[in-house]
Image (cartoon, helix red, strand yellow):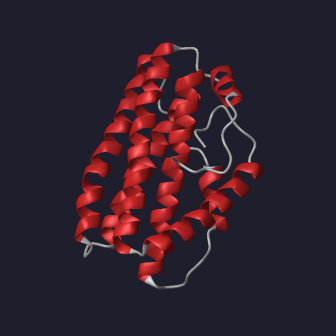
């Protein structure tokens, strides 16, 4: 369904378990916060696109709710929200992202593709955790996030198809999948990061 070119090795779940679970939860919390911020930024940048605004408003609420859920889980194990870490995955994606100048419409498509890609990878990572982590409560916790991220990925793709030709969206998506596989190859898997 996601079409990612490279799958996460299930061994990554062992890396997560080897770390203090507090580390992945902290990173996850900030990922949810950034996802809410990205949706707000899209609304602010394209307020004239009613369907986009209507589709993203509930996602902002949901992502912020996810931040609160992750924080609650973190507190339940006696942890506290640590400092935000550098997101090498997203930073490298943005560095490799093709630049299209000042055309707002082209920029919208690129932003939607980037959001869809990050949601797709998050979904895939949460599936790896839900299928492979030994702690059954955490496995169930991440299963719920996997389902949600799949819906967000589809939503960003649907918005892209609403405003752009389906063939163009498909071509851009293939470019992003290729770009993302380069990024995944460059990064070493870490048990304290979602991406």
Residue 82 visible somewhere in the drawing: no
Quadrant of image for the C terminus:
top right
Which residue shows up at 49% across the image and 73% down it?
167
Is residue 22 placed above or below 170 in the rendered structure?
above
Residue 71 percent location from the top left of the image: 40, 30
Is residue 5 placed above or below 148 in the rendered structure?
below
Is residue 131 placed above or below 5 in the rendered structure?
above
The residue lying toward the viewer, choosing from 103 and 163, is: 163
Identify the residue at the far front of this view: 167
Q: Left of 34 or right of it: where is 87? A: right
Q: Left of 28 or right of it: where is 177? A: right
Residue 70 percent location from the top left of the image: 42, 31
Residue 19 visible somewhere in the drawing: yes
Is residue 129 placed above or below 123 in the rendered structure?
above
Q: Left of 76 or right of it: where is 132? A: right
The residue lying toward the viewer, choosing from 143 and 93, is: 143
Which residue shows up at 46% across the image and 38% down it?
29
Quadrant hosting residue 74: top left
Quadrant hosting residue 42: bottom left
Residue 65 percent location from the top left of the image: 31, 38
Which residue shows up at 40% across the image and 75% down it?
164
Which residue shows up at 61% across the image and 38% down it?
193
Q: Left of 73 or right of it: where is 170? A: right
Q: How many numbered markers are drawn? A: 0
Residue 89 percent location from the top left of the image: 64, 51
């Amino acid at each position: 369904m996601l079409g990612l070119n490279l799958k996460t090795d299930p061994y990554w779940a062992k890396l997560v378990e080897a770390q203090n679970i507090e580390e992945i939860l902290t990173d996850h919390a900030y990922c949810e916060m950034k996802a809410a911020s990205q949706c707000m930024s899209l609304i602010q940048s394209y307020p004239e696109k009613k369907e986009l605004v209507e589709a993203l408003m509930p996602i902002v609420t949901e992502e912020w709710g996810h931040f609160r859920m992750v924080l609650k889980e973190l507190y339940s194990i006696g942890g506290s929200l640590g400092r935000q870490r550098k997101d090498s995955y997203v930073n490298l994606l943005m560095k490799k992202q093709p630049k299209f100048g000042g055309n707002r419409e082209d920029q919208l498509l690129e932003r939607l593709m980037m959001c869809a890609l990050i949601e797709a990878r998050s979904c895939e990572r949460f599936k790896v955790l839900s299928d492979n982590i030994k702690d059954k409560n955490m496995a169930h916790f991440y299963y719920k996030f996997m389902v949600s991220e799949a819906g967000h990925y589809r939503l960003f793709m649907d918005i892209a198809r609403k405003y752009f030709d389906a063939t163009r969206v498909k071509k851009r998506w293939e470019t992003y999948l290729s770009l993302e596989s380069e990024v995944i190859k460059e990064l070493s898997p870490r048990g304290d990061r979602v991406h």
